[in-house]
Amino acid sequence: MTFTPGDPMTRPLHHRAFIDPENNEVWPALTHNEPITLVNNRGWRLAGRVETLSSDRQCLWIQLDSGMGRQLIHHQDGFVLENTQKAN
């Protein structure tokens, strides 16, 4: 990987990251143990329940279904809510 002098070394924004245009919060208000399904542009689905949502709503922990453990998801990881009712 090469960098051009003067270019900031920042992580690129993913075009499918969820952003609420009205208040710039990256995830909607989600409650503990709420069922959730996230999907990325490659079709990879993560289904489970919300364990924790960070106070700034940039990160959430999802307890995956079928005993698959838990995963930390950042808003720039390219996942969106599959259930569009919650995203509105």
Image: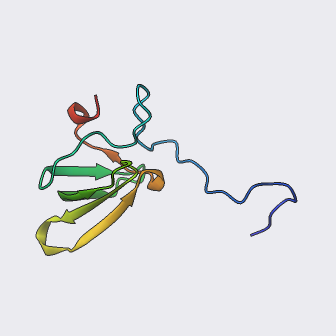
Outermost residue toward the top in this view: 22
Outermost residue toward the right in this view: 5
Outermost residue toward the front in this view: 55
- The residue sitting at 41% across, 30% down in the picture is 23
- The residue sitting at 44% across, 51% down in the picture is 78
- The residue sitting at 42% across, 51% down in the picture is 75
x and y percentages locating residue 6 in the rendered image? 85, 55
The quadrant holding residue 25 is top left
Question: Where 82 falls versus 65 (above or below)?
Answer: above
Numbered disc total: 0
x and y percentages locating residue 26 in the rendered image? 40, 42
Question: Where 4 falls versus 29 (above or below)?
Answer: below
- The residue sitting at 53% across, 47% down in the picture is 14
Q: How is the model colour-coded?
A: rainbow
Q: Is residue 76 left or right of residue 50?
A: right
x and y percentages locating residue 48 in the rendered image? 17, 59
From the viewer's side, name the closer residue of 31 and 19. Answer: 31
The quadrant holding residue 4 is bottom right
Q: Is residue 88 left or right of residue 21?
A: left
Question: Where 45 falls versus 68 (above or below)?
Answer: above
x and y percentages locating residue 37 in the rendered image? 22, 51
Q: Is residue 2 left or right of residue 47?
A: right
Q: Quadrant of the N terminus?
A: bottom right
Q: Quadrant of the C terminus?
A: top left
